[in-house]
Amino acid sequence: MGQMVKDKVVVITGGGTGIGRELARGFAENGAIVVVNDLARDKDTGQSAAQQVADEIAQNGGKALANTDSVAEWESANRVIQAAIDTFGRIDCVVNNAGITRDRIFFNMSPDEWRAVVDVHLNGSFYIARAAAPHFKKQNSGSYVHMTSTSGLIGNVGQANYSAAKMGIVGLSKSIALDMARYNVRSNCIAPWAWTAMTANIPADSPENIARIEKFKKMEARKIAPVAVFLASDKAATVSGQIFGVRANEIYFFNQIRMIRSVHRSDGWTPEAVAEHAIPAMEPSFFPNVPSITQTPWDPI
């Protein structure tokens, strides 16, 4: 077992299944005290998924607490953080991992499908992060790790709700990193690739989708944990406001939006001048309107 985050108290939302479960295990293996937050229950036994993971950590000699409060409401999100304080006396890291999908092509997406995803991913990330902020500020230390997605960073078909929420998390993380830097609090994002229950809804209805599913299955959820553990550790003291990606054994670093070209007219612009001058000058730098899957055409390494 490693000791990278020894005795740090870490709250992991959505920690009972998928990527969250592997994050909880990875943090515990590296010495952290883990608060496993998850609403899910085993469909056969009815047992809390969070409790199952917490029990497993305890059986392996670690310390863990299960919590089943929802992140999607302000009051219950505060209870998640308070559980860490009440039980362990402090909190050192929040991993905003909880998530759901309600995929639908944009012109058929309902307001309920929009709200459900935004409430868990974006509002939930804010509620949990905000609840931890006074504790981080008081102790003059802390770290946030937020799960974003290439569906937001690049784009994806049929995921307007998920893509918007995941891009919103990037803005949230950046703002936290700026606002809390004076208190030695850091905030970073990870875009994970992994085969989990959330990605298992890809329909096996075409040769292309079948090949895509087989590729996804090579991307193990446990591969995400090392980067998250590092970002929560003291070794990452100078890393904040950044976006990373993990795909099997590959680690990516994402750029962020910056101005890349400019044009100027001393007499100002008309719509006609924009069409005749500005757009032709900038068009060679336009980004192709393609889904995120086209940006990683090689097999996971």
Image (cartoon, rainbow, N blue to C red):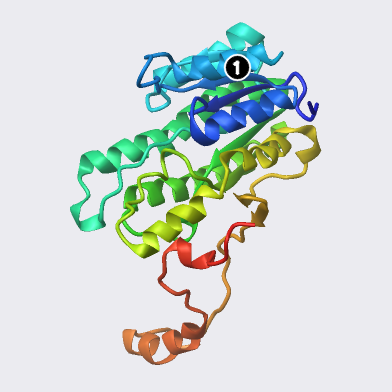
Q: Specify the quadrant of the image occupied by residue 29.
A: top right
Place of residue 228 in the rendered image (x, y in percent of width and height, measured from the top left): 66, 38
Seen at 56% across and 50% down, the residue is 218
Q: Position of residue 84 (x, y in %)?
A: 59, 14
Q: Quadrant of the C terminus?
A: bottom right
Q: Which residue is mark 1?
A: 56
Which residue is found at the position 51% from the left and 16% from the top? 52
Q: Position of residue 266 (x, y in %)?
A: 50, 87
Between 108 and 297, the residue placed more toward the observer is 297
Report whether 293 appears left or right of 55.
Answer: left
Q: Dot 1: within a 10 Å radius of its alpha carbon, few (fewer than 14), some, or many (20 or more) residues? A: some
Is residue 89 found left or right of 162 in the rendered image? right
Q: Nearer the viewer, residue 54 or 205?
A: 205
Residue type highlighted by circle 1: Glu
Q: Secondary structure at mark 1?
A: helix
Front one among 140 and 146: 146
How many marks the image carries: the answer is: 1
Q: Is residue 96 visible?
A: no
Residue found at the very far top of the displayed protein = 86
Position of 288 with respect to 24 (left or right) is left
Q: Residue at x 39, y 85 (%)?
A: 274
**Residue 70 horizontal/vertical position (percent):** 40, 22
- Asked where in the image residue 99 lies, by quadrant, the reply is top left
Task: Judge whether 168 appears above or below 266 on screen.
Answer: above
Name the image quarter holding the N terminus. Answer: top right
Q: Please, is residue 120 above or below residue 152 in the view?
A: above
